């Protein structure tokens, strides 16, 4: 006898396979890293922390799609492996690989390693990358639930917080 499998009912989509625990943990670490980067005042720290968040997201893809290799193969960059394992993320892998030296310089404390703009741009790019990775892995990070009570209406404004025009009834 084999293991029992959940079979979707007629008309239902099959369930996506569960995300391996290691991949889920790495995605969580990537999100926490991005949150931490957002709060960093120093551009070097913000850049390095965001880049590490992207690296953890790449590691989540590798954890979900690969098996450890036996033997003593030469270590390869996670960005190189990501491009091989997930070709749809190849441009992202190239982009982040190009920023690895800048991250190292920022971590070393070099005063001109990154600008404020570069750090802010990377934080934004890592956020986009995380969303793409989650889509590739079928990981769904649930949105916070809508409040059970109605949202307040803005009096005299051009719209309400819900996006409905002021004066319209829901």
Image (cartoon, rainbow, N blue to C red):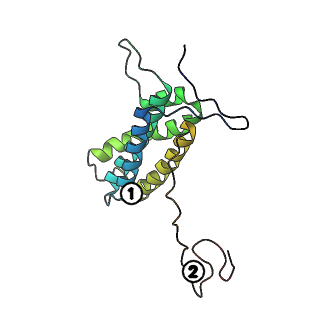
Residue reaching furthest left? 109
Residue 22 rendering spot, x and y as whole percentages: 40, 33
Residue 105, quarter of picture: top left
Secondary structure of the residue carrying tag 2 is: loop
Q: Mark 1 and 2 residues: CB-CB less than 8 Å, in contact? A: no
Q: Nearer the viewer, residue 145 or 121?
A: 145
Looking at the image, which residue is at 44% across and 53% down? 123
Looking at the image, which residue is at 50% across and 36% down? 93
Q: Nearer the viewer, mark 1 or mark 2?
A: 2
Q: Nearer the viewer, residue 29 or 160?
A: 160
Alpha carbon distance from label 1 to label 2: 31 Å
Residue 54, quarter of picture: top left
Looking at the image, which residue is at 40% across and 51% down? 34
Secondary structure of the residue carrying tag 1 is: helix
Residue 47 rendering spot, x and y as whole percentages: 37, 50
Within-10-Å neighbours for mark 2: few <14, some 14–19, many 20+: some
Residue 7 higher or lower than 44, as above or below: above
Residue 131 rendering spot, x and y as whole percentages: 53, 47
- Dot label at residue 153: 2
Residue 28 rendering spot, x and y as whole percentages: 40, 44
Tag 1 residue: 38
Image quadrant where one finds the C terminus:
bottom right
- Dot label at residue 144: none
Looking at the image, which residue is at 28% across and 49% down? 110
Image quadrant where one finds the N terminus:
top right
């Amino acid at each position: 006898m084999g293991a029992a499998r959940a079979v979707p009912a007629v008309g239902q989509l099959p369930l996506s396979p569960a995300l391996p625990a290691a991949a889920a943990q790495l995605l969580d670490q990537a999100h926490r890293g991005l949150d931490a980067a957002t709060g960093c005042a120093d551009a070097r720290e913000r850049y390095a922390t965001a880049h590490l968040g992207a690296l953890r997201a790449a590691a989540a893809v590798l954890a979900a799609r690969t098996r450890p290799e036996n033997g003593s193969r030469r270590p390869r960059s996670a960005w190189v492996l990501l491009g091989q394992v997930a070709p749809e993320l190849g441009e992202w892998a190239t982009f982040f690989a190009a920023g690895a030296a800048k991250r190292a310089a920022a971590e070393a404390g070099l005063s001109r390693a990154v600008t404020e703009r570069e750090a802010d741009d990377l934080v934004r790019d890592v956020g986009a990358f995380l969303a793409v990775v989650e889509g590739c892995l079928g990981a769904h990070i649930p949105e916070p639930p809508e409040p059970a009570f109605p949202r307040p209406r803005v009096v005299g404004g051009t719209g309400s917080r819900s996006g409905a025009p002021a004066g319209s009834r829901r």
